[in-house]
Image (spheres, helix red, strand yellow):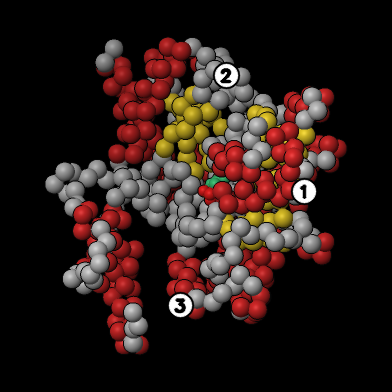
């Protein structure tokens, strides 16, 4: 088990070369490559046995790199689906260092100066959201948004509900809210009364944000039924559309009815770094807690989240843990926080540019305009366009909808098959009460590797695909 300096040095060198080759020497596309049966690797050699393998480290690394070929290529600059995670390479260095140090940072005394370093990171992260450190604001570095949201639900529950009335607790959010929130409520035993509050319709100014009047009515109803409203989850950049709920309005309601206000900013919160700060993000410090993933809009490798809370307590679910702070500290020191702010600003500008270009393409209907760096659209084929002339986003006709679904599915695969960008689709309820959600194509510009070149390729691939498919549809009539 023990390695000498020379042995470890050689292994590091081999590993470095292998990683460099993977990162810089490959030709690859952002979309999943279809693996042919001949190419299908025999995975049986991946199984573990009692004896050491007779393969060399180099061979094992090659095997890992082959395994990494399957699935999505989220490191590709044209990757604009799901949630691109940058995987900033500076953090790879601090991970190596952190793992080599292997210091225990669950308690201050285990590594006082490293804990101090992590605390500085946390204080800096709190300052991004203008939280008041003097009145006790603090936070923890988590593994991601789910862990952060769970922490929020647990804290709200423990502050506002006695253990014998968990089943009476009511929580409030919209259809835009991330699935990790209901998962968290189930774990916390407070999922009995989850109220899905209507959101503003897609064709309104505050599209996809929570309707405050409906929320207040529901809270009052629940009080009348002797239930215990205790938690509102605000979307601060929903995954589907980037919608940001009205934090100031929610904060007033939360104060009036004494509820915990949690901001799920797993995707959106760090856009608060941008100058001038997007208006909707100005009041994050009114929330009782915030989730903000560093592995999304802070470009760090997967497994890095942040949970902030106005009152520091024994916040973390973890005890023995890695020193996640290094992963944030080293890139911030080397690059300066301004670099992150500018990179996020670039994404906001890119999506605005993309938006204005897409609007010019005949038949494209923008379903959700970019609030942060996400937009959704669909394309109406020529043969159906007359139906959409008056009211841009009229739907509700099942037959028309199924044609649109087929058309846009084909469009999406045509765009992705060009191999320069990867987009994906999602389903949106345009109005809260709609029976059916409609399929839309979603674009998220978030990787630090994505620049104007990729966005121009995206626009041109969408344009060409729309034209090609429109011609085919007409020809097949
Ligand atoms: C990604 C995301 C989550 C879940 O975070 P993980 O880091 O994947 O656990 C929760 N909420 C929102 C809004 C997200 O974008």
Q: Is mark 3 within 8 Å of ligand 1?
A: no
Alpha carbon distance from label 1 to label 2: 36 Å
Which of the marked residues, 1 or 3, is nearer the chain's N terminus? 3
Front position among marks 1 and 3: 1
Front position in the image: 196 or 471: 196
The secondary structure type at the circle numbered 3 is: helix
Does 280 appear above or below 86?
above
The answer to which quarter of the image holds residue 65 is: bottom left
Residue named by callout 2: 434
Left or right of residue 175: residue 131: right
Left or right of residue 377: residue 246: right
Q: Is residue 166 visible?
A: yes
Which of the marked residues, 3 or 2, is nearer the chain's N terminus? 3
Tell me the residue at 67%/70% (across/down). Answer: 119
Q: Which mark is residue 100?
A: 3
Q: Find residue 296 and report its horizontal and vertical position in percent.
A: 53, 53
Q: Find residue 459 and report its horizontal and vertical position in percent.
A: 42, 39
Alpha carbon distance from label 3 to label 2: 54 Å
The reply to whether the C-beta atoms of the residues labelled 3 and 2 are less than 8 Å apart is no
The answer to which quarter of the image holds residue 410 is: top left
Q: Find residue 402 and report its horizontal and vertical position in percent.
A: 41, 17
Alpha carbon distance from label 1 to label 3: 39 Å
Q: Residues within 10 Å of mark 3 (few under 14, many from 20)?
A: few
Front position among marks 1 and 2: 1
The secondary structure type at the circle numbered 1 is: helix
The secondary structure type at the circle numbered 2 is: loop
Tell me the residue at 58%/52% (across/down). Answer: 147
Residue named by callout 1: 159
Left or right of residue 424: residue 163: right
Q: Residues within 10 Å of mark 2 (few under 14, many from 20)?
A: few
């Amino acid at each position: 088990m023990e390695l000498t300096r020379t042995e470890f040095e050689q292994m590091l060198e081999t590993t470095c070369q292998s990683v460099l080759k993977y990162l810089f020497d490959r030709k690859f596309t952002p979309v999943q490559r279809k693996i042919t049966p001949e190419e299908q690797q025999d995975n049986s050699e991946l199984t573990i046995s009692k004896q050491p393998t007779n393969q060399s480290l180099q061979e094992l690394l090659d095997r890992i790199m082959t395994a990494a070929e399957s699935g999505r290529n989220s490191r590709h600059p044209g990757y604009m689906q799901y949630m691109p995670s940058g995987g900033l390479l500076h953090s790879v260095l601090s991970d190596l260092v952190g793992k080599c140090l292997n210091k225990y940072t669950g308690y201050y005394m285990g590594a006082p100066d490293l804990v101090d370093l992590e605390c500085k990171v946390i204080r800096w992260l709190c300052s991004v959201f203008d939280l008041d450190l003097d009145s006790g604001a603090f936070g923890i570095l988590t593994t991601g948004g789910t862990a952060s949201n769970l922490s929020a639900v647990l804290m709200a529950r423990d502050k506002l509900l006695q253990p014998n009335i968990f089943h009476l607790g009511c929580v409030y959010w919209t259809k835009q809210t991330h699935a990790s929130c209901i998962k968290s409520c189930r774990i916390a035993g407070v999922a009995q009364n989850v109220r899905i509050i209507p959101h503003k319709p897609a064709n309104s100014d505050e599209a996809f944000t929570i309707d405050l009047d409906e929320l207040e009515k529901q809270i009052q109803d629940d009080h009348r039924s002797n239930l215990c409203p205790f938690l509102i989850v605000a979307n601060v950049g929903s995954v589907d559309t980037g919608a940001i709920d009205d934090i100031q309005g929610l904060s007033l309601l939360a104060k009036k009815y004494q509820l915990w206000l949690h901001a799920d900013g797993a995707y959106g919160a760090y856009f608060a770094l941008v100058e001038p700060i997007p208006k909707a993000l100005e009041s994050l410090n009114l929330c009782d807690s915030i989730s903000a993933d560093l592995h999304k809009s802070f470009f760090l490798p997967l497994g890095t989240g942040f949970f902030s809370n106005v009152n520091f307590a024994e916040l973390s679910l973890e005890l023995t843990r890695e020193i996640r702070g290094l992963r944030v500290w080293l890139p911030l020191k080397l690059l300066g926080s301004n670099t992150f702010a500018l990179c996020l600003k670039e994404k906001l500008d890119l999506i605005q540019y993309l938006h204005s270009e897409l609007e010019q393409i005949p038949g494209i209907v923008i379903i959700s305009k970019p609030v942060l760096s996400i937009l959704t659209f669909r394309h109406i084929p020529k043969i159906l366009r007359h139906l959409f002339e008056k009211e841009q986003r009229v739907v509700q006709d099942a037959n028309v909808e199924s044609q649109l679904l087929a058309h846009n599915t084909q469009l999406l695969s045509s765009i992705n098959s060009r191999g320069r960008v990867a987009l994906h689709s999602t389903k949106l309820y345009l109005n809260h009460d709609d029976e059916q959600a409609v399929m839309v194509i979603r674009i998220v510009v978030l990787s630090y590797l994505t620049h104007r070149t990729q966005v121009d390729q995206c626009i041109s691939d969408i344009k060409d695909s729309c034209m090609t498919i429109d011609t085919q549809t007409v020809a097949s009539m």
